[in-house]
Image: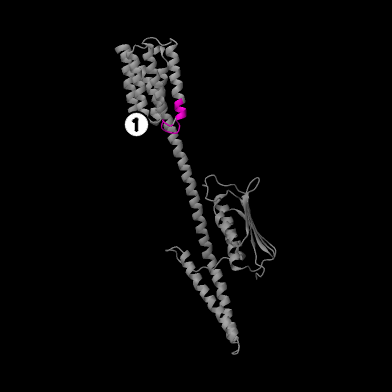
Amino acid sequence: MSWLPGSADRRDVALALGVAGLAQAEVWSGVVAGGPAPAVAATALVMGLVLAWRRHAPLTVVVVVCSAGVAQAVLGVDSNSFFTPLLAMVVAVSSAAYHARRPLLALLAALGLSWLAVLVEHGPSGDVLFAGVVVGGAWLAGHLVRVQQDRAQLLEQRAAQLERETEWQAAAAVAEERARIARELHDAVAHSVSVMTLHVAGVRRLLQPEQQTQKVALLVVERTGREALEEMHRLLGVLRQPAEPVPYTASPRLANAAELLEPVRAGGLTAELRVTGTPRPLPPGIDLSAYRILQEAVTNVVKHADASRIDCTIGYDDGAIYLDVVDDGRARRSDPPQPGGRHGLIGMRERVAVYGGTLGTGPLPERGYRVTATLPLPREAP
């Protein structure tokens, strides 16, 4: 069927052959009253076969089908005894309402030709109102289907667009959080490199004059340390936003974690902090990251859960530091879903990933939410 346009022509051809065959059966069985059988059969054949183009030339199909109906009226066919022309007209008009670029023009053409056929067959006393109801009903049915499909496609496109925007927002949030983490860790790393450089310079000055080889080696280390500091400052300038201020603030420490719970208690919640193991100084970067993770977890409870209690645990052992935050609340229904999950989880995941740790989050079986994090400590940590 390559001579037919489009990709769905097999269904249309099957429909057209079915209507044409039904019309021929009616004509040659003697059911149809009036008119010469060969001429009526020819017009009925045209009415059926032209439906094969109902998707690709809907306006033309409407004109041909309705014109064939006028021809049958001229031949003297009793329309009340011939069912197939009515079926062909309904299919043609509803298809035009769905597929035609100018569906209103198809409606006007169908109404005009249908009324002409009625007037030819019955004269001025013909029931043009019935013909108008049939044609208008068929057109309205096709139009409503088209409107519903267009609406469904629009909703699908909006859903796909929303999904893409959510992915973009999640990616932007991850990038922003990584830049924020890098800016915060800059001070800690810069301080450590500065201390190393100062110690190397001090040791170099204490060497004896004959220790020239050692002095040269230490001078190289000292110069490399200063260059590394300069490169870190340049990197920080790239990470900062153009209008972002550069205030100096002391990095928070996990030893001050109790301060995080004071605003929570002031808001009427019960908040407890428990420390297990032996607290000890932590590497600056891990100390800052652990504090921020605990801060994000507590902030999430206050902002997004109807909780009455928060229990925080900080655990120390030889190889890692453990954080555990548990609340007894439920998420507020008014909170919109956040890209990548509950608000703040992106930051916690990124901070844990920096040090190769693990993060566990999720609701408890009955009520509440739990956040656990593990940050491994270096073997030579102080």
The relative height of residue 134 versus residue 190 in the rendered view (above or below) is: above
Q: Amino acid at mark 1?
A: Arg
The quarter of the picture where residue 34 lies is top left
- Few, some or many residues within 10 Å of mark 1 (<14, 14–19, 20+): few
Residue assigned mark 1: 102
Residue at the front extreme of this rendering: 2
What range is drawn magenta here? 2-13
Give yes or no for residue 4 being in the magenta stretch: yes
Horizontal relation, residue 203 to residue 99: left or right:
right
Q: Give x and y (percent) for residue 48.
A: 41, 21
The relative height of residue 364 versus residue 246 in the rendered view (above or below) is: above
Residue 185 seen in the current view: yes
Q: Give x and y (percent) for residue 232.
A: 51, 70
Q: Give x and y (percent) for residue 237.
A: 46, 67
Q: Residue at x 54, y 71 (%)?
A: 190
Q: Nearer the viewer, residue 272 or 68?
A: 68
Is the C terminus in the top left, top right, bottom left or bottom right quadrant?
bottom right
Q: Nearer the viewer, residue 174 or 323?
A: 174
Q: Give x and y (percent) for residue 243.
A: 42, 63
Give yes or no for residue 370 being in the magenta stretch: no
Q: Residue at x 56, y 70 (%)?
A: 189
Classify mark 1: helix, strand or loop: loop
Horizontal relation, residue 30 to residue 321: left or right:
left
The quarter of the picture where residue 314 lies is bottom right
